Image (cartoon, coloured by chain):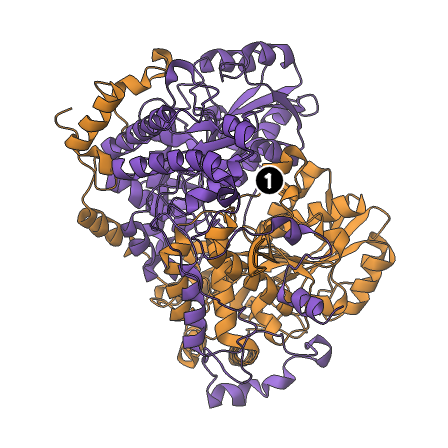
Chain colours: A orange, B purple
């Protein structure tokens, strides 16, 4: 066994220990433990992977590669579209960095996992408060998959096979929805939105809702940043025909925006990344999933934590509940296949919401709205630039149309990037909007950043 | 017994709230912004405003920090002690992976940034894909799936797409799944619209070949298999299984949850698999996070590349890019490109181990499992029902049936009692084909001393089953809380799933 590397993650790789273990087992070498793998499938060569590097060398290599990335602070960035720059308080990173949480598995052993169970219970509770829904699960992969699961759940609950979505919707989210719902025999239909106001055309929606409609899905705020204001009407239209209402949210907006539970939502989904989770180039993020009513609870996918007590002494204690819905018990009859989820991102959200509280969240929402409206006003004052495209209230994102500047949005954005500004998302998916793009402004954008954006656009258009 | 978990009587965060406190002051707009934008209260129409503020807790930063730090102290992780949870590969998570992945150069990157600003991470993701291709023998990987089950679902959809492209979409309706499979396999197949056909395990612990032969037909879409299987036994007939499935036009899916046993020894490609998912949070040392985030990349043989979800990470000369131009793709299975911070950790893990270290990881995971199995059996109270050649790979399934029969003490009780020794419970009652099962996977990162301590604890618990079963049935005693009433938690009358439900229960409604 001479020449075998002693590896720092593998305690028994020291020659002494290895020899002791082999001796006790009556073996000459570890190879004897692989005799059960037939020669016909053995890999008779070394893996073509680099040899081990020291931790220092790895650090240099990885930091060198990462240094090629430009962050949203290296070059101020106005991208949103489902992942948004928000400030993450240091206390959040500290808690989710604690290895007692980070290195634990799903809390199947409740007695030894009270910490993460209680944190998840508190997360679920805060999501219920934010959305005004009865129940929240402990996380899905992200908004898109949460929506996919919501559609399937609506299908199971209603026994129907169609879901109606708004026309202006993130194409990636819509694609994920199809990938999730079509294998369940469901069809995704699109409902028209008014090209001027962005609002759902109620008559068209009414025509679309039939006895086959499992759910109507709306987003508030929408993918393009504007609010849908006919929420009560849409809720009524859906419920009149026995369909469910699914609402997609940016949870941070719920500091001031009417929660879906106040207008009759049956299922709420959303992207929890803004709640204390870094963007991380798009993942991991946090799928929010909440519902109301017992009929829906039984069909909810994912893990749920409940408050109970100890058998002796009746102390309060937490554990996973309703596991009979889940794959490890119910197998092919489970409500979903989800097992590993985004627990640590949910914990981040709980810490974040605890830090901000209702008042902090309200003030944050007002800062975001003030800054985004400031940006809209400043950009709108540039000749030929129109923002927002839709006549409606907006939250942190808004559409910008460069059509009347006579220049291509791609070109303007390319030139902004040359000047160290990362502009919004070009809306190629809606050619009818013209030279349009989607911008995002949050609390992380200083006035200097916004002014510099406007100055540079003005300069480029000159 | 030496273990004492912290026992804070930590109340719900909602009860320690004090009106008017705050734990974070977000930035305020400046006066010019307010002047231009107008009064913030006018920017949102009344009908869109919430009628009352959300009932979130109100606390200062120090109170929030203490609350959650106390909670972490009441949680058992790999960094706390031995965590031999079978099929979950709870190995040590190297700290360098956490350190480097918390760089602002990854945290503060937006997924839609121009590719010229993300070449660093794209190159890392590209390199990682290539490494995973080499480790499995697959020809192309998608890094998008967020977890193992998500990878399985993606794979099952590709199997559908493959058959549909051959005009056999309707006919290929059956997915074959061993009775010992992870629960996610049948759940994923069913979600993708397949009828599951369950294949029994033979008395020796292998997939029953005759049963496979008897159910395959033109309706067979594929077979989902993990190898070594969940009994820890390497399916020696894997090439024959592959031959049977392929001969009827089906595909072979590799559940990579047990990949930690075979790195560098064999590959799914050599075994005849067409699709593979890997659990990076198992085999490649990324933290499980209390249940996530993980990552479940999916790799395929050349014939199936077109169906992979978009985007793939592609390369043109020195330029790396997100490749969406794939017309036969099944579409997107998730927002954006995958759980990047997890993928980055796995890349760092592979670099730290290198080819030798990866192979050593598997070798020592197998050595540790066999050592542990042999030592526990020497105690004479447990059995391993399926143990051909008295050899397992990275995990094994013990049965406590004899103890149960003679004392009434169940596998569940034994697993709880281990917690009192500072050892996390093994997986219990899975796979379901073993009575009173305790599934151990020690992983390569446990020292001989830890394994010996585990053996000692198992022997002590077996003795106690006869001498003092009452104490055992009430275990654990050293954890933050005693045995939890799980039945009450799920009972409709007592169920409490949020603080608002608790408030309602308290007020008697």
> What is the chain identity of the residue bearing mark 1?
A
Secondary structure category for the residue under label 1: loop
Query: Which residue is under mark 1?
Result: A337
Q: Is residue B200 left or right of residue B337?
A: right
Image position, residue A66 (x, y; %): 29, 54
Image position, residue A383 (x, y; %): 53, 77
Q: Is residue A236 above or below residue B3?
A: below
**Quadrant position of residue B161:** top right
Q: Nearer the viewer, residue B473 or B257?
A: B473
Image position, residue A88 (x, y; %): 43, 68
Q: Is residue B219 left or right of residue A450?
A: right
**Quadrant position of residue A430:** bottom right
Quarter placement of the C terminus of chain B: bottom right
Q: Nearer the viewer, residue A271 or A163?
A: A271
Can residue B192 be spotted in the picture?
A: no
Image position, residue A406 (x, y; %): 53, 67
Local packing at callout 1 (Cα closer than 10 Å; few below 14, some 14-19, many 20+) is: many
Can residue A195 be spotted in the picture?
A: yes
């Amino acid at each position: 066994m001479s020449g075998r590397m002693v590896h720092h993650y593998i305690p028994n790789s020291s020659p002494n220990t290895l020899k002791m273990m082999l001796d006790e087992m009556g073996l000459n070498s570890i190879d004897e433990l692989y005799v059960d793998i037939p020669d016909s499938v053995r890999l008779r060569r070394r893996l073509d992977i680099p040899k081990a590097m020291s931790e220092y060398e790895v650090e240099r290599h990885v930091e060198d590669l990462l240094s090629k990335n430009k962050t949203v602070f290296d070059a101020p960035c106005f991208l949103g579209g489902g992942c948004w720059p928000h400030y993450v308080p240091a206390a959040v990173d500290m808690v989710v960095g604690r290895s007692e949480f980070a290195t634990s598995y799903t809390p199947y052993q409740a007695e030894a996992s009270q910490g993460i169970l209680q944190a998840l219970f508190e997360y679920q509770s805060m999501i219920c408060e934010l959305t005004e829904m009865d129940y929240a699960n402990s996380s899905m992969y992200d908004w898109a998959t949460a929506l996919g699961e919501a559609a399937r759940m609506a299908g199971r609950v209603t026994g129907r096979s169609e879901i109606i979505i708004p026309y202006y919707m993130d194409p990636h989210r819509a694609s994920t929805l199809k990938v999730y719902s079509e294998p369940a025999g469901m069809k995704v239909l699109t409902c028209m939105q008014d090209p001027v106001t962005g609002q759902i055309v109620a008559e068209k929606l009414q025509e679309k809702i039939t006895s086959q409609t499992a759910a109507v899905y709306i987003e508030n705020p929408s993918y393009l940043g504007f609010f849908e204001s006919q929420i009560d009407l849409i809720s009524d239209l859906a419920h009149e025909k026995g369909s469910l209402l699914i609402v997609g949210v940016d949870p941070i907006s719920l500091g001031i925006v009417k929660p879906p539970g106040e207008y009759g939502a049956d299922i709420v989904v959303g992207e929890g990344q803004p709640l204390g989770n870094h963007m991380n180039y798009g993942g991991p993020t946090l799928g929010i999933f909440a519902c109301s009513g017992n009929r829906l609870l039984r069909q909810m996918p994912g893990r749920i934590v409940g408050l109970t007590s100890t058998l002796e002494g009746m102390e309060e204690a937490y554990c996973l509940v309703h596991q009979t819905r889940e794959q490890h018990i119910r197998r092919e009859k489970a409500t979903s296949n989800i097992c590993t989820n985004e627990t640590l991102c949910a914990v981040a959200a709980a810490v974040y919401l605890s830090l901000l509280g209702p008042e902090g969240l309200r003030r944050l929402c007002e800062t975001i709205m003030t800054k985004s409206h400031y940006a809209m006003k400043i950009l709108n004052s540039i000749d030929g630039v129109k923002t927002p495209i839709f006549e409606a209230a907006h939250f942190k994102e808004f559409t910008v149309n460069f059509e009347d500047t006579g220049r291509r949005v791609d070109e303007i954005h390319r030139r902004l990037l040359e000047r160290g500004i990362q502009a919004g998302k070009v809306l190629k998916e809606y050619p009818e909007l013209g030279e349009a793009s989607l911008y995002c402004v949050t609390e992380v954008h200083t006035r200097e950043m916004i002014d510099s954006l406007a100055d540079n656009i003005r300069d480029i258009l000159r | 017994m030496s273990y004492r978990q912290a026992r804070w009587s930590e109340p719900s965060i909602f009860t320690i709230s004090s009106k008017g406190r705050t734990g974070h002051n977000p930035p305020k707009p400046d006066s010019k912004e307010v002047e231009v934008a107008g009064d913030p209260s006018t920017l949102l129409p009344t009908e869109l405003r919430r009628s009352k503020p959300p009932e979130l807790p109100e606390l200062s930063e120090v109170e929030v920090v203490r609350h959650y730090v106390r909670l972490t102290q009441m949680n058992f992780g790999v960094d706390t002690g031995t965590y031999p949870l079978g099929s979950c590969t709870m190995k040590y998570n190297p700290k360098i992976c956490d350190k480097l992945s918390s760089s602002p150069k990854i945290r503060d990157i937006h997924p839609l940034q121009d590719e010229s600003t993300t070449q660093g991470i794209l190159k890392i993701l590209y390199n990682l894909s290539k490494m995973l291709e080499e480790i499995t023998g697959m020809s192309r990987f998608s890094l998008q799936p967020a977890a193992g089950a998500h990878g399985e679902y993606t794979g099952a959809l590709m199997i559908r797409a493959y058959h549909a492209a051959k005009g056999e979409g309707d006919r290929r309706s059956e997915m074959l799944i061993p009775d010992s499979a992870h629960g996610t396999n049948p759940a994923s197949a069913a979600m993708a619209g397949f009828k599951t056909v369950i294949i029994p395990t033979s008395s020796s612990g292998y997939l029953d070949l005759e049963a496979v032969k008897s159910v395959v037909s033109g309706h067979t879409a594929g077979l989902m298999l993990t190898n070594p299987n969940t009994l820890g036994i390497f399916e020696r007939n894997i090439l024959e299984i592959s031959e049977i499935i392929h001969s009827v036009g089906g595909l072979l899916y590799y559940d990579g949850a047990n990949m930690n046993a075979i790195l560098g020894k064999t590959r799914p490609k050599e075994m005849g698999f067409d699709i593979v998912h890997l659990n990076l949070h198992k085999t490649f040392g990324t933290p499980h996070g209390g249940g996530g985030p993980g990552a479940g990349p999916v790799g395929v043989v050349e014939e199936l590349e077109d169906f992979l979800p978009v985007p793939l990470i592609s390369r043109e000369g020195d330029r790396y890019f997100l490749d969406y131009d794939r017309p036969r793709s099944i579409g997107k299975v998730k927002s954006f490109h995958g759980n990047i911070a997890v993928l980055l950790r796995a890349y760092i893990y592979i670099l730290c181990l290198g080819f030798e270290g990866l192979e050593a990881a598997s070798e020592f995971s197998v050595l540790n499992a066999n050592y542990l199995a042999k030592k526990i059996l020497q105690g004479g109270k447990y059995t391993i029902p399926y143990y051909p050649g008295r050899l397992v790979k990275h995990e094994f399934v013990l049965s406590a049936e004899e103890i149960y029969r003679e004392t009434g003490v169940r596998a569940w009780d034994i697993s709880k009692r281990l917690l009192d020794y500072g050892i996390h419970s093994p997986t219990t009652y899975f796979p379901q084909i073993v009575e009173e099962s305790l599934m151990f996977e020690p992983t390569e990162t446990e020292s001989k001393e830890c394994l010996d301590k585990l053996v000692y604890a198992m022997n002590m618990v077996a003795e106690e089953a006869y001498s003092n079963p009452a104490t055992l049935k009430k275990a654990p005693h050293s954890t933050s809380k005693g045995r939890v009433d799980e039945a009450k938690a799920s009972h409709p009358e007592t169920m409490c799933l949020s603080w608002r439900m608790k408030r309602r229960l308290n007020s008697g409604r």
